[in-house]
Image (tube, coloured by chain):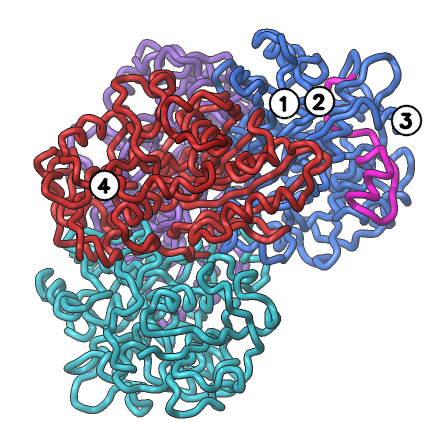
Chain colours: A cyan, B red, C blue, D purple
Amino acid sequence: MVFSVAVAGASGYAGGELLRLLAGHPEFEVRTVTAHSNAGQRLIDVQPSLRSLAHLTLVDTTPQNLSGHDVVFVALPHGKSGEITAHLPAETLVVDCGADHRLVNSDDWAAFYGGDYFGAWTYGVPELPIGAGKQRDRLVGARRIAAPGCNASTVALALAPGIHAGVIEAQDLVAVLAVGPSGAGKSLKLPNLAAEILGSANPYAVGGTHRHIPEIVQSLRWAAAAGPADPTSAACASSPDATISFTPVIVPMSRGILATATARLVPGTSAAAVRAAWEDAYADEPFVHLLPDGHFPRTADVLGANTALIGLAVDEAAGRVVTITAIDNLVKGTAGAAIQSANIALGLTETLGLTMNGVAP
Amino acid sequence: MVFSVAVAGASGYAGGELLRLLAGHPEFEVRTVTAHSNAGQRLIDVQPSLRSLAHLTLVDTTPQNLSGHDVVFVALPHGKSGEITAHLPAETLVVDCGADHRLVNSDDWAAFYGGDYFGAWTYGVPELPIGAGKQRDRLVGARRIAAPGCNASTVALALAPGIHAGVIEAQDLVAVLAVGPSGAGKSLKLPNLAAEILGSANPYAVGGTHRHIPEIVQSLRWAAAAGPADPTSAACASSPDATISFTPVIVPMSRGILATATARLVPGTSAAAVRAAWEDAYADEPFVHLLPDGHFPRTADVLGANTALIGLAVDEAAGRVVTITAIDNLVKGTAGAAIQSANIALGLTETLGLTMNGVAP
Amino acid sequence: MVFSVAVAGASGYAGGELLRLLAGHPEFEVRTVTAHSNAGQRLIDVQPSLRSLAHLTLVDTTPQNLSGHDVVFVALPHGKSGEITAHLPAETLVVDCGADHRLVNSDDWAAFYGGDYFGAWTYGVPELPIGAGKQRDRLVGARRIAAPGCNASTVALALAPGIHAGVIEAQDLVAVLAVGPSGAGKSLKLPNLAAEILGSANPYAVGGTHRHIPEIVQSLRWAAAAGPADPTSAACASSPDATISFTPVIVPMSRGILATATARLVPGTSAAAVRAAWEDAYADEPFVHLLPDGHFPRTADVLGANTALIGLAVDEAAGRVVTITAIDNLVKGTAGAAIQSANIALGLTETLGLTMNGVAP
Amino acid sequence: MVFSVAVAGASGYAGGELLRLLAGHPEFEVRTVTAHSNAGQRLIDVQPSLRSLAHLTLVDTTPQNLSGHDVVFVALPHGKSGEITAHLPAETLVVDCGADHRLVNSDDWAAFYGGDYFGAWTYGVPELPIGAGKQRDRLVGARRIAAPGCNASTVALALAPGIHAGVIEAQDLVAVLAVGPSGAGKSLKLPNLAAEILGSANPYAVGGTHRHIPEIVQSLRWAAAAGPADPTSAACASSPDATISFTPVIVPMSRGILATATARLVPGTSAAAVRAAWEDAYADEPFVHLLPDGHFPRTADVLGANTALIGLAVDEAAGRVVTITAIDNLVKGTAGAAIQSANIALGLTETLGLTMNGVAP
C-alpha cells in the first residue's frame, strides 16, 4: 500500500529535507507541497536539489490543500501549525515538525514561546527510555505526532539513559552544542549571513533562554520517572526535576549538531555501570549507536543519515560523565525523526526510507 | 539475483563512497573490503559513517582476496590497479576508479603519469555523446570499465554536446574548477591540511600540467568525431584536435566540483541553436540535467547525488558560450559513475542504488 | 599633521574595513562615522571587532555630518554616493568606495547600472601600467578618487601588464573568480545566507552580466593605449578594444578573491618575454608582487593585507597565458585601495596604515 | 632602542604568527629565523603570507644560531624547547610558546606530558588576577617566560575573576571549546586533513585527557589563593583545588577559540555581584574586555587581534554562571601573549606591535 502525503512548508529547509527523504520512501508518495510566499512556483525552482520531484508545484498552505491525504507533514514556523492542523481529520496522520505540540506543560509554552497553546501530541523520539519501555510504544497507532526540536532530542538522547538508570544526576546538567546554521531556516537576518558565520564560532541564546530547554527537561523527567503511570501526561510533568545549562554555538558547517552533554556522576558508580546504562538503552536501536570506549563521533559521520552516534567517557577527576552526540539536525533532528515516527505510527518497518550511513567526508 | 561485490581500496574516500552507495543498492552485496595499511581493522573504525557495514573487516588488497566475486570495484592510487586487476578472471566485471585504464593513447599516459601503461578500458561516462549514440552503448556487456576522473568527466559533460553539435569550437577551451579537497584523498600532505584550506582558495596544477587534461581532450575528440568508425579506439585518438586551458582551485568545501567551462561560439550560431545542442544531448538522461535559461547550479544541489547539473549562457560580447556544471566529485565524479556503469554493463536498471536528489543545504 | 576623517556607510563590511585600517593609520583620525538604519547606535555594537573605536557613535549620513573633515571615505550602495558627495567642498579629499564614479563612459553606466550618471573620478588602482607610467601619477594631488571594484581591480592587475607590453591579446580574455561572500555586503537576501553558501560553490552573474565587466575593460583599454594622450579621458574610452568572459563563483570563505584570468598568447612570444612584462610592471611595487615561476598564490596569504599576489604560467599547448591573482576583496579590493590612493593624493608615504603581510592560516 | 630577535620554529603556524606580529613591532627586529626540516629554505617560500620578511632565510634550530640576540621566541613542539633554551644566556629574554615551562608541578608534567621536566618559567598571562594584583606584576623584568596554552589561557581568563572574587565555585567547572585546527600545527595526521574537518564538528581528548587541564587548574588555583605568599610557587600548587570537565571540539574555521565555560554560582550571590567580579578584574585591561549584559562574542571579532572578549550570564534556573570567551588561538592564545609578555618584561609599552581590533568579517 502506498500512502498519499502532503508536506506543508515545503519551501524551507526542514520541508526540503522531508521531501528528500520521502522521495526515497517506498510506501509514501508526495502528492501535495505547500508554501506561503513561494506558492505558485515550481518546487524545483525553490528546492533545486530535489530533481526527482520536478513535477510538483507549490500551492498555498491551507487546510483545503492539505486535506485528503493519508499523511500530512508540517514544517511551519511555531505558532502556525497549531492553527492549521486543527482543521485536519482525526484519522489523518499529522506529524508536526514545529514546536507547537511538543510541550505538555502550558506554563513552559507560555514562558518560552508565548501565544496560543495548542496542547501536546505524542513526542517523536522513539528511542527515549521511559519506564519499562521506550517512547516508541506510545507512537504505535498515533495520529498526532510532535517531531522533536533538533537540539532538544540530541541532548535528551545523550543523557536519558544515564538518568533512567540512575547513574548520573538529573540536576546541574551542562550541555554545549556546536550547530550548523540550517537549523535557523531561511530567515533573512544578519546573524544568518554567510559572511557572519564563515570563519567564526557564534553563540546565541546564552544563559538559559533557548526554547529547547523545557523540551529537554521534559524528556529527562520522563526518563527519570519510575512506576506504571504514564510520565508523558501533563500531570507528571513537574516531578522529578532536572536542571540544565544549555548553550548552542553556531559553527561554519551547513548541517549537524555535536552536543557535549555532561552530568555529575552519582557517587560510587563504576565506569562499567555507566557504560551499561547506555548499552542497555540503545543496544537494539537501528538509529542510535553507542560507540566503543574511547571513540567519539563527528557530525560528518551522520550527515544525511537518521543516525545519532554517542560517545561516552567518565572523567573521574571532574566527577562527571561526558557524552558526545552527533546528529544531522535536519534528519534525525527533524525530518528523519518525523518519518521514523510516522513509520511506527502506521505499522510500517521503522527504518523505511531512512539510512543509517552518513555522507562523509 | 544478487551480485557479490568486492571493493579494493575500501579505506579511502572513493572506496568509502562506493561502499555507501553499494550499501543501498538492492542487487549488490558487499562481501569483501580490502585495504593496504588498514588491513586487519574493522571497516567501521576506518569509515565510521558506514554504520550498516559494521560487520565487515578489511583484508589485504590481493588478487586472492578479490577473486570469486561477480563485481570488483577498485579504488587504488594510479599505478596500482593495473597490476592487481590483471590477475582477475575475464568474466568478472572490474570497474577501476583509478586512472590506470582511462587513456587510449600511451603517449598521453607517458607524458602525464609515467610508469607502466596498462591499456584503456571502456570509459565510464555513459552520457557522452559520440557519433550517433552515447558512450552508454559501449558499456553494455562490458567487463572492464574505467570510471572517469572527476574533473575530467565534469568538463567533458559540460562541453561535449556543443562540440558534438558543432556550435562551439573545440580549440581554445578554458575551464576553471572550484573543487573540494576530498578529491585529493587521504594523502598526508601539507596542502591538504584543514588549516591550509579553510578560509582560502588554493590553485594547483596551473598552466597545463593537470593529469586530467588528456582525459578531457580524449572525450572531446570522441564527441567531435563523425562517421561510423569507433572513435574510442586508439587509432582515432589524435584527430580531430581539442585544446584546453584547465585550472583547478581548491575551495573550502569537502566535496563538489563547480566547473566554469567556456568555448568560443562558432560564428553565426544562434543562442537557440546552442541551447538545442545541450537539450538534444541530455533531454532523456536521468542524471545529467540542463537547467532552464538563466538558471545555474550550485554544488550543494548535487551533494551525495549522481547528478550533473548544467547551466548554459551565451555571452555575445565575449564571443563565448559559458557552461557551469556542478557534480559531487565522489559520486557522479567517481563512485556513482562506477556503479551506474556497472548497472549498464550487467543489464540492470541504470539508476539502481543511485539518487538524483542532492543533500542540501 | 593629522588629517580628520569621516567614514560614510560605517555600518557595512567595506565601512568596517576602512575603520579597521584607519584605526592603525598614524596620520588619519576618524572623527565621524555615519550610517543609515543604524544611526544612533554605538559603533562597537554594530562593528564589535573594532574595539579601539568604542568611543564613536553612528550619526546620519548627511552632507552636514560629513562636512568639515579633511578626508571623507564613502562606502555606500551605488547610486547613493553620487548625490551626497556632490555637496562636499572641492578641497576635501573624497574617496568613493562605491561604483558611482568609476566609469568614464556614460553608456557603460547606463547599460550596467542605470539611474543618474555622476561622472568619473580618478581611478584608485595606483599600480595600473598606463602609457609610460602608472595610474599612480594621476592620483597625486587628486581630491576625488574612485576606489575600484574588487573583482575589477583584481582582473585588471592580473592582465594589464601583458596587454600593456603586447605579449597577450586583449580580445577573448577569460576570467573565473572564486570570491568570498563579504563582497556582497550585509544584504539580507537568500543567496547570502550561510546555509546556502557553506559546503557549496555558487556562481552568479553568469554570461556577461556582471557590473564589473565594463570597469575591467576600461582598465585594460588604458593599459593597451600608447601615445601621449591621457587614455583615462572619456574620449579614449572606446579604443582599442578588449573583450572578456567573466564569471564569479561564491565559495565558502568570508573574504578573498582568487582570479584565474587567462589570455591568448601573442603568437611567437617567448615565456621569458611574458614573464618580463609582469616583472617590469610590478618589480618596484610595494603591494603587487609577481611570484617566482611555478609559484601560485592562495587567498589566505593576503587576508587582511593590501597585497595582490600574482602567479604566472604560459600554457603552450593551450596557447594561453594563465594568471592567478589573490587579493583580499575588502582590503586591496576596496578599503586598502582607498587608503593607499588617499595616501598618494595627500603626499603621504604610500604604504602608511597598510600591511603587506597576510593573516595566515 | 631596537631589540634584536630570533624566532625558533619559524616554519610552523605559531612561529609564522610571531613573525607576522614582530614585523609590525616598532622596537623588535627579526634577525634570525630557525627551522628543522625547512632549514635552508627562504622564509617566504614556507610562509608565503610574510611578504615583508622576504629577505630572511631559515637556518637550523641550534643554540649557536639563537645566541647573540636580545630576545628569543621559541615555538617548538613540547620537549624540544627545554633542551635548547638551557644553552641561552641568562640575560637573554627567552619566551617559550611551547609547553615545556608552564607547569609548576612536576607531577602534572609527568602525568600529562612525560619525559624530562624542565621547570616552570614566569607564566605569560598578564591579566590573571592573583592575590592583590595581576600576573603582570611577575612579568616585569622577567627573562624566562612561558607563553600559555591557547585553550588554557582562554578558560583561565574566562573563570579566574569569579573564582578570585568568590562568586563562583572552583569545583565542578565545565568548559567546552569550539576551536580551529591551526592550534594543531602543521602535523600531518589524518584528523587534521581538510576533508575530515570541513562540514564537521570533531571532538578530541574527551573525558579529562587534554594536556591543558593541569595548566587551567594551576591558573585557577592561583586566582583562588589569598594571602601574601606567592601562589605561583610550586609549594602552593596543590591548594586550594579546582576541578574541570574540559572538552575541545574542532570546527571548520582556521583560527579561533570560543570557550563556553560555566561554574556553579555560589549560593546567594547576586547577578550584580557576579558581573562586578569580572568588571573589577578587567576594567583597565587593554586586551581583555567584558561585554555588556546580553552581549556575547564571536571568534571573528578577534581574528588577528590580541583581544579576549568575554560575555557573561547568570542562569538562575541552572544555578550556573555562563561565560563565553573568544580569542584568536594564534594571537592572544600564543604569539600575541608572548609579545605582550615580552613588552612587559622589557619595560616597553605593553600594547606595542599588537592590535585590539579583529579582522571581521
Residue at x 76% of width, y 35% of height: C214
Q: In the rendered structure, the residue with mark 1 lies on which chain?
A: C
* Label 2, label 1: how far apart the Cα atoms are: 7 Å
Mark earlier in primary sequence (1, 3): 3
Element under disc 4? strand
The answer for which chain carries disc 2 is: C
Q: Which residue is mark 3?
A: C235
- Residue to which mark 2 is pinned: C170
* Amino acid type at mark 4: Phe
Mark toward the viewer: 2 or 3 = 2
Check if mark 2's residue and mark 1's residue have beta carbons within 8 Å: yes
Q: Is residue C127 magenta?
A: yes
Cα distance, mark 1 to mark 3? Answer: 26 Å
Note whether residue D107 is visible.
no
* Residue at which label 4 appears: B73
Can I make out residue D351 in this image? yes
Quadrant into which the N terminus of chain C falls: top right
Distance in Å between CA atoms under marks 4 and 1:
41 Å
Mark 3 vs mark 4, CA separation in Å: 65 Å
Q: Which residue is mark 1?
A: C263
